[in-house]
Image: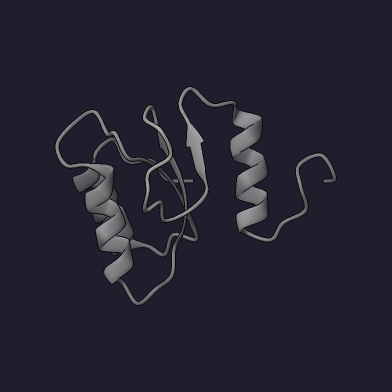
Amino acid sequence: MLEAGSAPEALTVLDAVQVDLLVLALDLPVAGSGWDVVRHIRERPVPTKMIVTSEDTDPPDSPGPFVRKPYRAAEVARLAAHSLNWPSPTQA
């Protein structure tokens, strides 16, 4: 698991290593935005699955499953397992 605190940090990580699943806050608190990261991922040849979060309503062009903040960790774990074709956490 890797963590980035801003859009520029996320872009650096995405360019350095393959990321299978990204949990992305569209309303990042510092420089850049989650939408900058979405655009970058869409331009890459390597597919990256995303779970998108925001305090706002479901974005009209969401690149993946959407979870409204504040969210429960169990909900994100269930979406992550589903996105990666893993057994659900309750079945594991």
Residue in the image at 48% along x and 53% along y = 64
Name which quarter of the figure residue 31 lies in: top left
In this view, 46 is above or below 68? below
Q: Is residue 55 left or right of residue 92?
A: left
The residue under the point 63% across, 40% down is 77
**Picture coordinates of residue 53, whole percent (x, y):** 43, 37
What residue appears at the point 41 percent right and 51 percent down from the top-left corner? 62
x then y, percent, for residue 76: 59, 38
Report the label total. 0
Residue at left offset 38%, top offset 41%:
3
Q: Position of residue 16 (x, y in %)?
A: 30, 62
User: What is the residue that sits farthest to the top in this orientation?
Assistant: 70
Tell me if 12 is positioned left or right of 51 in this view: left
Report the residue that reaches farthest toward the bottom: 45
Q: Residue furthest right?
A: 91
Q: Residue furthest front?
A: 60
Above or below, 46 against 58 in this view is below
- Image coloring type: one colour
Q: Picture coordinates of residue 90 (x, y %)?
A: 81, 39
* Residue 52 location, quadrant: top left
Viewer-closest of 12 and 86: 86
